[in-house]
Image (cartoon, rainbow, N blue to C red):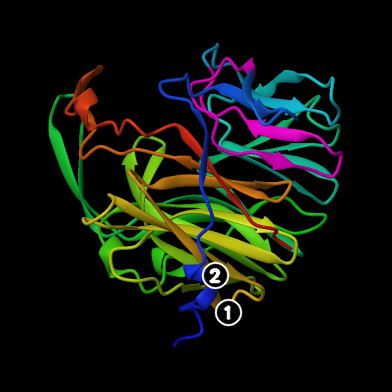
Amino acid sequence: MGAEGVRRTPLHRRRQQLERRSCLKCRPCADLLLRSQDQEVRQEWNAPDEQLDIFHEFSDGCLYIPGHDPKEDWKLGNFYRRAKGKDAKWEKVRTLPDGVHCYDMEEFDGKLLACGYGTYESSDRGKTFTNKRGPRYYSFFRFPKSVYAIADAQGEGEGSFTDKKGKTIKYKRPAHVSLAKKVAGKDFEFVPGAKPDDVFPETPEFAKEALKAIRPSAIKDKLVYIGGIVHNDHQIQPLGAYVAVDGPKCFKAKRIKLPAGAQPWYTMAVGSKVYLLWSTPDGKKAKFVNHVSATSDGKSFTELFSFEAPTFARSMEYLDGFVYFGLGTEVKEHGHFEGNSLKLKFSADEVDKASGTILRYRMALK
């Protein structure tokens, strides 16, 4: 068994009752839902955004959500914040200059960071931001002494564009990835010579694709994260999970060994461990088997439990002795743009009816 392999133990056979708590089919993606003390899930707020993707709890005790794609003027970008407390309410903070997209947020060196078209820094908890223009950064990777802004990667291939005279120009595209690194007391600086293999090692199936690295969770001095092919604008089709440790110039990553056909969907840090959610197709009793593995050192992963479901679990969270899972859905092909028109290639019949269901599993995590 390799150092990054997944071990199965008798514990993974101990399946407790999964309870369907709520079916949230067809809700707008920007709804914010709160589980109340009476175990019900209710709508708490609706953000003026096309997509809410990441939740962060920072040192001020507040919950932060990057404004992925605000439905407002692009002169400013958004993030959303909620303080602790029973009576606390969500607030929209609209202070990111030329924001358009705010894909991720982080805290580092006493500053609040955001990324989208370049990086943003705030010394006053988001009242004002300065913007350092750059490529479209999708994720922050924070290590103990540094933080990286990571754009999408491109494998080798061919591209084309139309010049002002209407002539199609073809070109060869080298493999590349844009990384910027920040250490205490300094601005973000580009990492020269970075390659897709640095972020997505041992992943030949990515060779000619556009790639993203998302869902980082910290364990000691390491990060566990997920990589995938850019599948639909801001979404990915995940193919690999990785563990990285920082280095003098750039971080070093290894691929986590999962069974053939497995897709990793989510990482979650609780206590002294990081948990990895992944799924495998099962054509017998159910469409998918969803698995949860854990690591306490970033070197070896142990599968804790698994459960069958009509579709895959896209996300998970832990609260008060329960692990909650949000079931997701996928389609074969979303479509493409012809000019300014989006030509869809899927039908509503492809959307799994169980998508949006929240399941919970009773298990104390430490």
Badge 2 or badge 1: first in the primary sequence: 2
Q: Which residues are magenta?
A: 44-70
Instruction: Identify which residue is drawn at 55% across, 11% down.
Output: 73
- 355 horizontally vs 223: left or right: left
Tell me if residue 251 can be seen. no
Determine which of the numbered discs, if any, sits on residue 243 in the image: 2
323, above or below 333, in the image: below
Q: Where is 357 relative to 279, above or below?
A: above
Q: Quadrant of the C terminus?
A: bottom right
Q: Position of residue 225 (x, y in %)?
A: 53, 59
Q: Position of residue 222 (x, y in %)?
A: 65, 69
Per the image, is 35 magenta? Answer: no
Q: Nearer the viewer, residue 136 or 310?
A: 310
Do tag 2 and tag 1 residues touch (Cβ < 8 Å)? yes
- Identify the disc placed on residue 299: 1
Q: Is residue 218 visible?
A: yes
Q: Is residue 349 left or right of residue 311?
A: left
Q: Is residue 216 above or below residue 59?
A: below
**Label 2 element class:** strand
Question: x, y (%) of residue 321?
Answer: 71, 51
Q: Amino acid at mark 1?
A: Lys
Amino acid type of the residue tagged 2 in the rendering: Val
Specify whether 351 is left or right of 19.
left
